[in-house]
Image (cartoon, rainbow, N blue to C red):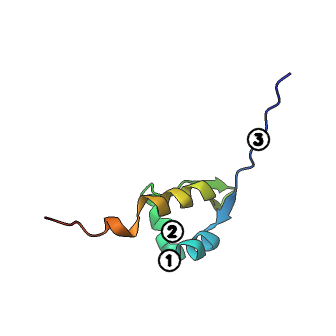
Amino acid sequence: MTSTTTVPRRLVSLAEAAEILAVSVKTVRRYIAAGELDAVRLGRRTIRIKAESIDALIDAHPVNSWRVRTS
């Protein structure tokens, strides 16, 4: 008999995502529109962002990649 353990998905609100990323809610909406954050719509007005998506966005933009060094 095999047991499967499911990891619960964590969803955060637009305001929570904005706080985590230290940006405005409007910027979070821009990230969603650009496809940089994965979001789901729950009902007509409720939007939630997948927490893994926030982690991926943070990991994709490390500080040391902002400057391009030329030798």
Q: Do we see residue 45 in this rendering?
A: no
The residue wearing badge 1 is: 23
Q: Secondary structure at mark 3?
A: loop
Residue at figure coordinates x 59%, y 55% from the top left:
52
Sequence-wise first label, 3 or 2: 3
| Side (left or right) of 19 relative to 8 | left
Q: Secondary structure at mark 2?
A: helix
Residue type, numbered disc 2 = Val
Q: Are marks 2 and 1 in contact (CB under 8 Å)?
A: yes
In the rendered image, which quarter is residue 11 located in? Answer: bottom right
| Side (left or right) of 37 relative to 11 | left
Residue type, numbered disc 3 = Thr
Residue lying at the far left in this picture: please name it. 71
How packed mark 1 is, by other alpha carbons closer than 10 Å (few <14, some 14-19, many 20 or more), is: few
The quadrant of the image that shows the N terminus is top right
* Measured Cα–Cα span from mark 3 to mark 2: 28 Å
Residue type, numbered disc 1 = Val
Residue at figure coordinates x 55%, y 61% from the top left:
54
- Decide which of 56, 37 is in the foreground and name it: 56
The residue wearing badge 3 is: 6
The residue wearing badge 2 is: 28
Sequence-wise first label, 2 or 1: 1
Residue at figure coordinates x 26%, y 70% from the top left:
67
